[in-house]
Amino acid sequence: MSEEIQLGSSMPKEFPLHWASDWGEDRTYGLWMAFTYKEVRQCFRWIKPGRFMMGSPQDEPERVDNEQQHEVFLTEGFWLAETACTQELWEVVMGENSSKFKGKQRPVENVNWNECNAFLDKMNGMMDGLDLCLPTEAQWEYACRAGTKTPFSFGDNITTDQANYEGNYPYNNGAKGEYRAETIDVRSLPCNNWGLYEMHGNVWEWCNDWYDDYDIDNVVNPTGPDAGSKRVLRGGSWFNNARGVRSAYRLFYDPDDRYNIGFRLSQGHKK
């Protein structure tokens, strides 16, 4: 089946986009591009098209039943913010900040799915052609894994030097670590192989999809079910144990829920 599916070009159709304030390419992580709004800058990384194994294998320790592993094909590349949306950006756009743990460079949190989409609508109305959206669940996991097949993008286990989670509850008999009991600034911890920061831990991140069991017959650019009652969350948070920050771990909340939840901007597909 994999040979029958054509992947798009590894390069974006247009670079830089007209709204970019600065852009470039670095040797380690590839193309990047940023926009600046009212002196607040957000950088994106170009995520090339590709295929990957989504979910977790049967022998992955502490896996959950809703992580059925299956091959997924993303035929088009997309831009993904290198960090979760900061409080600084949220506040300059929305004029308020409901986050519990205040800090300009901390991720915005305590925002529900509907509020995130209100933010996207407002941003897109301010900058012609910006076309910001939430990533699909498949895009999110593909970017989080960054070419890896292990439980974490950092390998078979993780430490609190690599992610912000509840370090008293390590993964698979690993060593205990720090419990910070709050969010931290974005870019505080190492990025993954594709230049993306804090994909594991810190705050949960909303995805665009409704939640359901995976449709393993729909594996080309999957966008989730057409309707549902819960939206998908990924990544875990400062409050969660190490199991919950695995690349394959799925959570689902009502669109009106907000506790410990933020989001990461995507660009390259319609909302």
Image (spheres, rainbow, N blue to C red):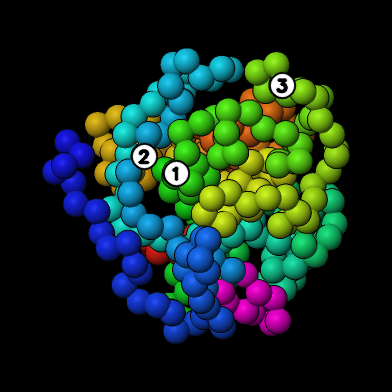
- Would you place residue 270 above or below residue 216 in this image? below
Q: Earlier in the sequence, mark 1 or mark 2?
A: 2
The disc at residue 139 is none
Which marked residue is nearer to the observer: mark 1 or mark 2?
Answer: 1
Q: Secondary structure at mark 1?
A: loop
Queried whether the magenta region covers residue 36, the answer comes back as yes
Q: Which residue is mark 2?
A: 52
Quadrant in which the N terminus is drawn: top left
Neighbour class for label 2 at 10 Å: few (<14), some, many (≥20)?
some
Q: Amino acid at mark 1?
A: Gly
Q: Amino acid at mark 3?
A: Gly
- Would you place residue 17 above or below residue 78 in this image? below
- Would you place residue 232 above or below residue 134 in this image? above
- Would you place residue 120 above or below residue 154 in this image? below
Neighbour class for label 1 at 10 Å: few (<14), some, many (≥20)?
some
Q: Earlier in the sequence, mark 3 or mark 1?
A: 1
Residue 242 found in image quarter: top right
Does the CB distance between marks 1 and 2 fall below 8 Å?
Answer: yes
The disc at residue 174 is 3
Front position in the image: 103 or 9: 9
Report the magenta residues as a range.
Answer: 34-42
Front position in the image: 90 or 112: 90
Identity of the residue drawn at 56% across and 39% down: 153
Q: Secondary structure at mark 3?
A: loop
Queried whether the magenta region covers residue 171, the answer comes back as no
Q: Amino acid at mark 2?
A: Phe
Q: CA distance from mark 1 to mark 2?
A: 8 Å
The disc at residue 147 is 1
Does the CB distance between marks 3 and 1 fall below 8 Å?
Answer: no
